[in-house]
Image: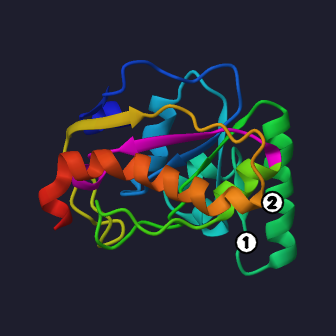
């Protein structure tokens, strides 16, 4: 799909740091293209998305999401807890879990939105490392609004896979510092490459 859209990726990180380990993968969310894009970036690594239930009903995105990933119903606490337990079980089976910690695509992309706590709570509870990833250009290649008719164009999409952040020995007291550290790591390249757009 990306090939026919004329989109190619370029890794700016020196190496592919994914080892034989399961991670909580945290990625900035800038475009509906992100979901498809990560299948190319992480093509040698087993991963699942955890995302809102509505994704399964979206055109195109539902094809990738409906039967392969973990949906979470934010309006139903009991079902949401079941989804989180399923994610923890998959982590034990050496699947990585991809979470967009902003929870949605911010209106003022590429500015990074505030991170929710869920990814970091799960990482600490399972003692799995966080793998931060910064996607730099998808917001320019496929705009978010208007939905299904947003402007799109071919081009290069740059990505940075950062060093994993270990969580061994962390407790819930470390949640805020882990969240903030992940935010800073993902945000630094956005400031470097898109400083003017963030003003």
Q: How many marks?
A: 2
Residue positioned 48% across, 38% down in the render:
38
Residue 119 image offset from top left, x and y in percent: 65, 56
Residue positioned 66% across, 29% down in the render:
46
Taking depth in this image into account, of 54 and 159 the one nearest to the observer is 159
Query: Is residue 4 in the magenta section?
Result: no
Taking depth in this image into account, of 197 and 80 the one nearest to the observer is 197
Query: Is residue 128 in the magenta section?
Result: yes
Residue 193 higher or lower than 58, as above or below: above
| Residue 136 shows up from this direction | no
Q: What element carries label 2?
A: helix
**Cα distance between the residues tagged 1 and 2:** 8 Å
Residue 38 higher or lower than 117, as above or below: above
Q: How crowded is mark 1: few (under 14 residues within 10 Å), some or many (20 or more)?
A: some
Tell me where the magenta segment starts and ends, as one range. 126-141
Residue that protrudes farthest toward the bottom in the picture? 75
Residue 144 image offset from top left, x and y in percent: 32, 65
Q: Mark 2 points at which residue?
A: 83
Residue positioned 82% across, 77% down in the render:
77
Q: Which mark is residue 141?
A: none
Rendered image quadrant of residue 48 = top right
Q: What element carries label 1?
A: loop
Taking depth in this image into account, of 32 and 134 the one nearest to the observer is 134
The N terminus lies in which quarter of the figure?
Answer: top left
Residue 87 image offset from top left, x and y in percent: 78, 49
Q: Mark 1 points at which residue?
A: 73
Rendered image quadrant of residue 90 = top right
Residue 72 image offset from top left, x and y in percent: 72, 65
Query: Which mark sits nearer the N-terminus, 1 or 2?
Result: 1
Q: How crowded is mark 2: few (under 14 residues within 10 Å), some or many (20 or more)?
A: some
Mark 1 in CB contact with mark 2 (< 8 angstroms)? yes
């Amino acid at each position: 799909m990306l090939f026919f859209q004329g989109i190619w990726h370029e890794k700016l990180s020196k190496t592919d740091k994914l080892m034989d380990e399961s991670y909580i993968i945290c990625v900035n969310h800038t475009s509906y293209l992100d979901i498809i894009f990560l299948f190319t970036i992480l093509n040698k690594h087993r991963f699942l998305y955890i995302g809102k239930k509505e994704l399964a009903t979206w055109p195109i995105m539902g094809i990738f999401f409906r039967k392969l990933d973990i949906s979470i119903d934010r309006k139903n606490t009991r079902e949401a807890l079941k989804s989180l337990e399923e994610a923890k079980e998959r982590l034990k089976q050496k699947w990585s879990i991809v979470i967009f910690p902003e929870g949605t695509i911010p209106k003022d992309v590429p500015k990074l939105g505030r991170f929710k706590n869920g990814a970091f709570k799960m990482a600490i509870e399972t003692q799995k490392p966080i793998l931060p990833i910064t996607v730099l250009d998808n917001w320019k290649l496929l705009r978010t609004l208007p939905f299904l008719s947003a402007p799109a164009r071919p081009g290069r999409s740059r990505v940075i896979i950062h060093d994993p952040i270990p969580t061994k020995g962390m407790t819930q007291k470390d949640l805020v510092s882990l969240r903030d550290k992940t935010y800073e790591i993902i945000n630094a390249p956005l400031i470097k490459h898109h400083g003017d757009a963030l003003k």
